[in-house]
Amino acid sequence: MSSTSTILIVDDEPSARAILEALLFPEGYELAFATTGQEALDSLEQVAPDVILLDVMMPGMDGFQVCQRLKAHKQWRHIPVILVTALDSPEDLVRGLDAGADEFIPKPVNGIELQARVRSMLRIKKQFDELEAAMQLREDLAHMIVHDMKNPLTTILMTTFAVRESITDPQASQYLDTIEAETRRLNSFMTDMLMLAKIQENQLILKCTPVNVNQIVQAVMETYHAVAQSRRIHLVTELPPGTPRPVSLDASLFQRVLDNLLSNALKYAPRESTVTIRVEYPEKQPDSPASRPSVRVQVLDEGPGIAPEHRERIFDKFEIVALKQRGVPQIGLGLAFCKLAVEAHGGRIFVEDNEPQGSIFTVEI
């Protein structure tokens, strides 16, 4: 472990750097040095340290501030930070913990203690790296499987179309409708998973063009017309009169969002109830705030509704399994996808009560 581990020593005092170097040199580490907090932050990409020894009392940016910046950065937050300090008051200890420090070494530095704490932090870092690598491998395999499953799903759909042309039995036709609907649903789920991965890895490039949102809504509603009829659910569209102003959107991604929300509403809506899609274009006045949305789309259902304490959690993919186990309705990976897709457009999505019963999912962009 020691032969390949890199320790970054950050201290403005040459004598302090020399002492730490002398104490750690026998351990066989790769040692890197920085004389200021900013220099340390600027060197992270090149050095890629496994542990950082960080002096607290430095001119300009002190160790507490450097630690806060490190722990706030997604790429560097998991590097263990050992604060090296002559400060020993409880207030300073609390400040260091609040900044995100993982360990403390008092000055003057004891060599045996320093070596032991560095080894301890390296063990933690190694365990984290191994866990992260395993999780990444599992995620990569899942994405590969999902991608490969789309091909047989496409074949099933094409075969369904071919069989439909050769049958006249109404009941057989209904069976084909069910096969086609469920296959499309599974295919949509696979698409959501692939898009979700791209959004999270910042690999999805939005292709925004001026879009007629009313037309997208009508296309999505038409797709689910047969499903709604089979479940005796009334589909209602509330669109403002006239020709709407275009909205800059990635049309395909936005349609997937509406598709997910409508599918979710129909899944949990009781028979003989109503599911509504409402579109509004808030008027922009000269004194309107810049954050005022260009379009607001709402999906209203009369299902079981979402309890207030779950309304943020249902959009978090890491919360979905726990919520499902607790029997929380109207959740799924599709909502996590919706949140990331809407936020990629600079918008927001949230859920409220639909009085007297049900939920209202609102998308504002």
Image: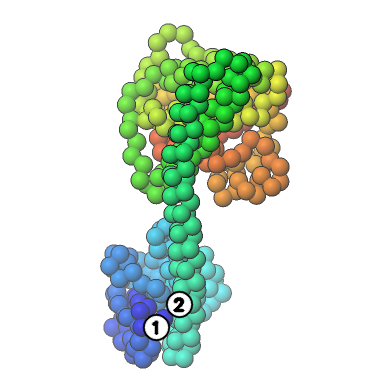
Residue 162 visible at all: yes
Q: Position of residue 110 (x, y in %)?
A: 45, 90
| 131 versus 5 height, above or below | above
Task: Give me the residue at 32% from left, 33% from top.
Answer: 207
Q: Position of residue 46 (x, y in %)?
A: 28, 67
Task: Give me the residue at 62% from left, 48% from top.
Answer: 321
Residue 358 visible at all: no
Residue that lies at the very extreme toward the top in this rendered image: 242
Classify residue 86 by image quadrant. Answer: bottom left
Q: Residues within 10 Å of mark 2 (few under 14, many from 20)?
A: many
Classify residue 68 by image quadrant. Answer: bottom left
Classify residue 274 by image quadrant. Answer: top right
Could you tell me how far apart the alpha carbons at marks 1 and 2 are, in whole angstroms? 8 Å
Q: Dot 2 corresponds to which residue?
A: 122
User: As drawn, is 4 to the left or to the right of 302?
Assistant: left
Q: Amino acid at mark 1?
A: Ser
Tell me the quadrant of the picture where the N terminus can be found.
bottom left
Q: In terms of secondary structure, where does tag 1 sit?
A: loop
Task: Give me the residue at 69% from left, 47% from top.
Answer: 325
Point out which mark residue 2 bears: 1
Residue that lies at the very extreme toward the front in this rendered image: 166
Evaluate if marks 1 and 2 touch, with contact meaning CB atoms under 8 Å apart. Answer: yes
Q: Nearer the viewer, residue 156 or 243?
A: 156
Q: Residues within 10 Å of mark 1 (few under 14, many from 20)?
A: some
Q: Position of residue 159 (x, y in %)?
A: 48, 29
Q: Amino acid at mark 2?
A: Leu
Point out which mark residue 133 bears: none
Task: Give me the residue at 43% from left, 44% from top.
Answer: 147
Tell me the quadrant of the picture where the C terminus can be found.
top left
Q: Position of residue 83 (x, y in %)?
A: 44, 75
User: As drawn, is 331 to the left or to the right of 1?
Assistant: right
